Image (cartoon, rainbow, N blue to C red):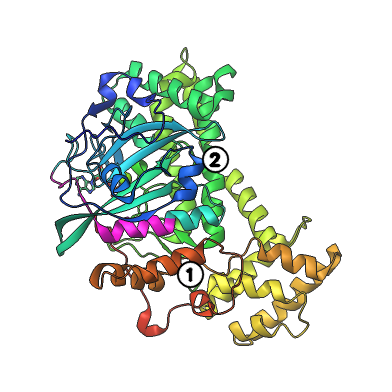
Amino acid sequence: MTHQDISIGTFENSFAGLPDGFFARLDPTPVSEPVLLAFNAELADELGLETAQLSRDELALVFSGNAVPLGAEPLAAAYAGHQFGNFVPQLGDGRAILLGEVRDRAGRLRDIQLKGSGPTPFSRRGDGRSALGPVLREYLISEAMHRLGVPSTRALAAVLSGDRVLREGYKPGGVMTRIASSHIRVGSFQYFAAGDDQASIKRLMDYVIDRHYPGAATAESPALALLQSVIERQAKLIAHWMMIGFVHGVMNTDNMALSGETIDFGPCAFMDAYHPDTVFSSIDQFGRYAYGRQPGIAQWNLARLAEALLPFIDPDEKKKSVELASAAISDFAPIYHEKWLEGMRAKLGLSQKEEDDRALIGELLDGLHRKGTDFTLAFRRLGDVHRDASAHAFLELVEHDAVLVEWLDRYRARAAREGGDAEKRTAMMQRINPIYIPRNHLVEAALSAAIEERDLGPFKALHGVLAHPFEEIAGFEAFALPAEPSERVYQTFCGT
Ligand code: AMP
Ligand code: MG
């Protein structure tokens, strides 16, 4: 390891201050020939990093792991997790290294983590590396999520390593730099719970409360308050995913962050045609993590968190702990449904509540499902029906389906009951219903140009469009369209 005395800012290393059993300390393993492919200068600025004065070569050294920046205390975190329902007592950062935390301009502590930075004691049989494809994919999709307004980890840098990794054949390697509110997962708690290490659970709980949910510290039961807060944030997050047609793909408990941010973009994708059973992940044979199952799975994962926290919920009475935790978990469903309904009303440009709203929304979704209509475009085009009496764009999209034509009349009547300005309703809907999402075929095309032709043009173009997902830009119509049958992507691969 060449320590080149490069400074990128002030590290705080609070996680590194936790006891030894929480992680293994180690430096990243250098790569052969790091080349900086993408760097998020805007995010660097938000984080208050001093990267503006560094050359691209210096940035490549730091964000490949070849030079550990001054003040960082690199480590690989320990965690466990349920993977597709099966418990694995030890997973951990097998190819990621946390450099440490920095305090951003808003005063929030943010993790800087390298992914694909070499083997760690948690690598099991893996090589500790990432292929470039998944690095660029995470870069595009996590940034798109952020721009869509969904809490998400962010992408700071993508580096080509100069090494090859063996996946389905040899692929160029890459290192991704990810920024997160923290990397603590449901699986982090499960790790200590599996070893019945109560002291560490307590320590981790206090750390999470202090970092993410300070209000819980003064509650009668901080553990219960923490659980309830995480449930609330996850319910909101999953509702948000559902609003934009996002399918995470691998909702294992080790991929669910306590902070409430979307984390670990593996075989995730956006649904084109509306269908609740949509699955993309090649490793999800039974559709466990299908679009429509995400709320139920989130609740299941949160129940695993509740189990780990159980001894602290009511330290005196086990039965009481179980009752309180069960009640909190049961609350997930109503909280989620409320957030979902709230979100769906907003997507339809409705601000008042009516008894039949859930049915009205359900009928629209049924219609889209039956017709196989593009989910994103359907809502975007619905926005136009308030200012265009012919509703041409929407009706064409649903092929003048008789049931949806009738539905549209009722929807318009529903909107009219609220009164208000038609232009304003359209504008409000267009601020919430994106025109551009990271469509799978566009993402695949951008990655394949970058990897096979060493052409970053399509990646940059797509990234640029996704930076403004709600603004229709003349000349970029193709970015808004679903795939032609020949371009359709049916599966995405972890390609780890
Ligand atoms: P993920 O599917 O990225 O959430 O990873 C699940 C687990 O497998 C985590 O513990 C990862 O660190 C580990 N893992 C995934 N890919 C690799 C790899 N190439 N080398 C070592 N560990 C890996
Ligand atoms: Mg993971």
User: Quadrant for ligand 2?
Assistant: top left
Label 1: which residue?
275
Q: Position of residue 56 (x, y in %)?
A: 33, 51
Q: Nearer the viewer, residue 462 or 218?
A: 462
Give the residue displayed 86% in from the left and 65% down from the top: 419
**Circle nearer the viewer, 1 or 2:** 2
Q: Position of residue 300 (x, y in %)?
A: 42, 43
Give the residue displayed 24% in from the left and 59% down from the top: 495
Residue range corresponding to the magenta coloring: 125-141
Residue contact between numbered discs 1 and 2, judged by CB atoms under 8 Å: no
**Left or right placement of residue 3 versus residue 332 in this view:** left
Q: Quadrant of the C terminus?
A: bottom left
Residue 361 magenta-highlighted? no
Label 2: which residue?
233
Q: Position of residue 202 (x, y in %)?
A: 40, 19
Residue 5 quadrant: top left
Residue type, mark 1 in image: His
